[in-house]
Image (spheres, rainbow, N blue to C red):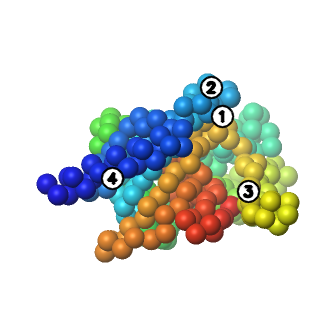
Amino acid sequence: MNKIREINKRIIQLVNAFKKDGYEVKKIAAEFGRVGIAAEHKRAYNYDTGKKKRAYYLEGTSYETGYLMGLLAEDEIHAMSSDFTKNMVTKFIKDATSRRGNLIKELLVSGVYELGKANFRELPENIREEIQGIYDGCKKFNPKTKVDMKHLLTLNAGIDILCSIAYTGFFLSRKVPGLEPSELNIPIMCNGFSIFGRHASGGHYFGRDFMFPTVNVFHDAAAPIIYKPIDAEGKESFPFVSIAAPGMVGSISAANINGVGLGVDM
């Protein structure tokens, strides 16, 4: 009973914190004694779709935070793991609409799946656990979910694998006779910047842009995700806010409670 009261008290505090920042809580998930929240901003909208921008709060171990996200955002996870992963492949091919381009696309897709599956066990344990948690949470929320481990793995390892293929051409050179490096395209990636001192009124600002193709999916699903990490022994780590999309493990950019920021640039 005390544990239930503690969880309810934490939920009230979190709902009030979101409200203070202009968000309205739309969904609350509680599993394993942990809390997950999905909220929508009252005034900030997506320019293209008109949908209100979302934010998430997740707490617990890697598996638990993944599970909570699966309960909160199964639709967005499916869009990212299915539509985003399939469409991003075409951005690595210069003439994706030609007959040969379609052949290269199919081989790239199958190659990413093969290499991703083969290298899954090489990923750090916490990443594997969070991916598994996302899948299990989606299945719990919707037993007929179209989210599967194959596409989740491709989402979280696929870009790295695609870059390794496109930069070297090694994998495809064995699959496509006469493949030329000029047939592949490396999408322009990102920039990071930092402003401090008098130009920042004595403060310090850090930012980055996202130049990787969004393929009409990422920019709709991307959101601030607040993490409160807890390890398997119950020890809390530094809370942080991450900019990513549901289904993605890791951050596009992030800052922790001590003001340490990071951005992924290529």
> How far, Cα to Cα, is label 3 from label 4?
31 Å
Q: Amino acid at mark 1?
A: Asn
Q: Residue at x 42, y 37 (%)?
A: 25
x then y, percent, for residue 242: 57, 56
Badge 4 is on which residue? 10
* Sequence-wise first label, 3 or 4: 4
Q: CA distance from mark 1 to mark 3?
A: 22 Å
Query: Which residue matches tag 1?
Result: 216
Residue of label 2: 49
Question: First in sequence: mark 4 or mark 1?
Answer: 4
Residue type at the position of mark 2: Thr
Residue 21 in percent (x, y) is at 54, 43
Camera-near label (4 vs 1) is 4
Position of residue 230 measured from the top left corner of the image (x, y, whole percent): 38, 67
User: At x 66% / y 44%, what residue is drawn?
Assistant: 88
216 sits to left or right of 94: left
Rendering coords of residue 165 (x, y %): 69, 59
Residue kind at label 4, given as amino acid type: Arg
Do we see residue 147 in this rendering? no
